[in-house]
Amino acid sequence: MTLGTRAGLEMGAATRDAFGRALQEIGSSNKDVVVVDGDVANSTRAEWFGKDNPDRFFNVGIAESNLIGVAAGLAACGKVPVAASFAAFLLCNAYDQIRMSIAFPKMNVKLVGSHAGISIGEDGPSQMGIEDVALACALPGTVVMVPADEHSARKATQQMVEHVGPTYLRVGRSGVPVIYDENADFKIGKANTLRDGSDVTLVANGLMVSAALDAAEILAGEGITARVLDMHTVKPVDEAALRAAAVDTKGIVVAEEHLHHGGLGSVVAMTVARTNPCRMDFVDLGDQFAKSGDGDALLEEFGLTGEKIAEKARAIAKG
Amino acid sequence: MTGTQGAPDFDQLAGLAKSLRKDVLIMTSEAGSGHPTSSMSAVEVMTALYFGGIMRYDASNPQKRDRDRFILSKGHAAPILYAVLAEAGYIQKDQLNTLRRIDSPLEGHPNMLRVPGVEASTGSLGQGLSMGLGHALNAKLDGLDYNVYVMMGDGEVQQGQVWEAAMAAANFGASNLIAIVDQNGYQQTAPVTSVTDPNTYAEKFRAFGWNTVDIDGHDLHATHKALVDATNYSSGPSAIIARTKKGKGVSFLEEDFTWHGRGVPKDQLDAALEELG
């Protein structure tokens, strides 16, 4: 992966691996945690929990609707079910079940969607969750998290279990650059400022945080200082950080590995539009499906790069 | 385990069934909408379940961990659930006539956050059996001995999720899960037979690994026996196909699916109540 190289970041583990390890750790002490799987636990890494706790691990088969209902029933009994599958299958296949069996009755279910984004590569569009954040954000009362690296994914997993109420955690398949150390500061709803700057603000989550740091490095070489916010929580979004960015800098570029409509970009735009309208631009997948191919090459082809973020930020900073 | 606590007084149950049917008619008439006919078909099953000594519950402690659970997956039959919950002491009887009002917790479809004794928020068909399976699996995790009863409609089982849950429940050996299909013969716009053949449901559940029985769902003796047997069955989940009539008890409502979402107009209510006796 070329992401993060300009910013001098080292490659690390995939966020799904970090989720799997964290879940395994949490499972050994918190006996209320159960996992409901749709026969993809080796992919989501929920299998590590399952091997340690076979009695608290339920593979309901390739049946996401039922997966969600079973998780809801267990939650109604006081358990803390982690319902993990591919982001595309979980959110898209079982959306009405998530809406009615989990969100509406406020069930304490932890939805985890792996294989999010186009960086999964060769398996192609059917497996790529690219609308999951929009769908999750549309569920009333649901926390939506998109961690950027292994350390923040571990913290996100811990906070997800501690939080009472429905949550959605998005994790990716491929290794991503390491941004934080093991003590990563991670608080639901609180953006992390990774770099300060006064010309423009780059807001990103997931693997696009590394791209944003690359962009900041490129811009710095041109004398443009960029503030970089890791907006790991899309909902509830850190409104204060966004308002400050809108006031302190000339505008905001939002970068995400997601469709244009309804993701982080929409949330940021709605937030600043209310009190502090500013110049904005967006780096995302636009309004299209991707295709099969090498993950890095796909990111490049679909413009999910530091260069693209820098290009849009430059226009704002100079405008 | 056994859910039986001796033979019930069937005359008393019959009287109760009649009174619950009247509650349904009155509250939906008052509300001006709702699903009286889908509720009336389910009356005997729910009467036997709640008042025939099958289900163990404590209305003063609705969240008691080892309570038996009832999930109304066919959530549009909310009126009969509310009538039963009032009779069982979870809610006040005088609340029934607030059905569907903006200031009432008795919403058009059951909301578990607002009404004690409602175990699941339903209304989008096909989801209750999965939730019931979650409750059933929890019993084993917590070392508790309780049963979960899930009532579905015969149109509802057209939902694929029902069969996902059926497959999984058999695989998990969830013998504390009992599905009841209220086979009243009609869905919203047509007889069920015009879409799927409900007479094959018992066979289908059997093929999915379930213990099944097909009964007259308005015969309290048969209904009670089927519930006792299903509760006592310990080798896997059980399904009771209860053959019923939509709108049972009132001739002008029976098997006329155009009444599906309508309350009986006030000028016809007395005639309907009179027919029930």
Image (cartoon, helix red, strand yellow):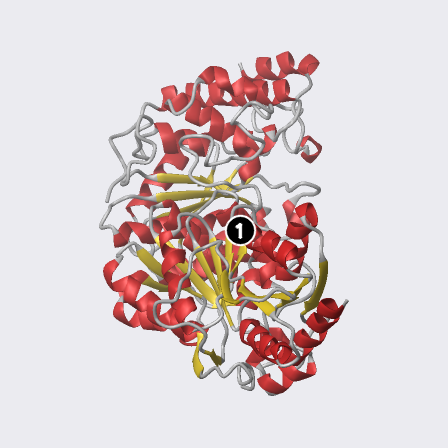
The answer to whether one can see residue B255 in this image is yes
Q: Position of residue B223 (x, y in %)?
A: 41, 36
Q: Secondary structure at mark 1?
A: loop
In this view, the residue in front, B211 or A110, is A110
Left or right? Give the position of B36 relative to A260.
left
Chain to which the residue tagged by mark 1 belongs: A
In this view, the residue in front, A139 or B92, is A139
Q: Residue at x 48, y 38 (%)?
A: B216
Q: Residue at x 29, y 72 (%)?
A: A51
The answer to whether one can see residue A46 in this image is no
In this view, the residue in front, A179 or A199, is A199
Left or right? Give the position of A178 relative to B9.
right
Choose top left, top right, bottom left or bottom right for residue B77: top right
In this view, B15 is above or below A170: above
Q: Residue at x 51, y 35 (%)?
A: B110
Q: Which residue is mark 1?
A: A236
Crowdedness near tag 1: few (<14), some (14–19) or many (≥20) residues, C-alpha within 10 Å: some
In this view, B42 is above or below A292: above
In this view, the residue in front, A138 or B111, is A138
Choose top left, top right, bottom left or bottom right for residue B85: top left
Q: Position of residue A217 (x, y in %)?
A: 58, 79
Q: Residue at x 68, y 32 (%)?
A: B256
Q: Amino acid at mark 1?
A: Pro
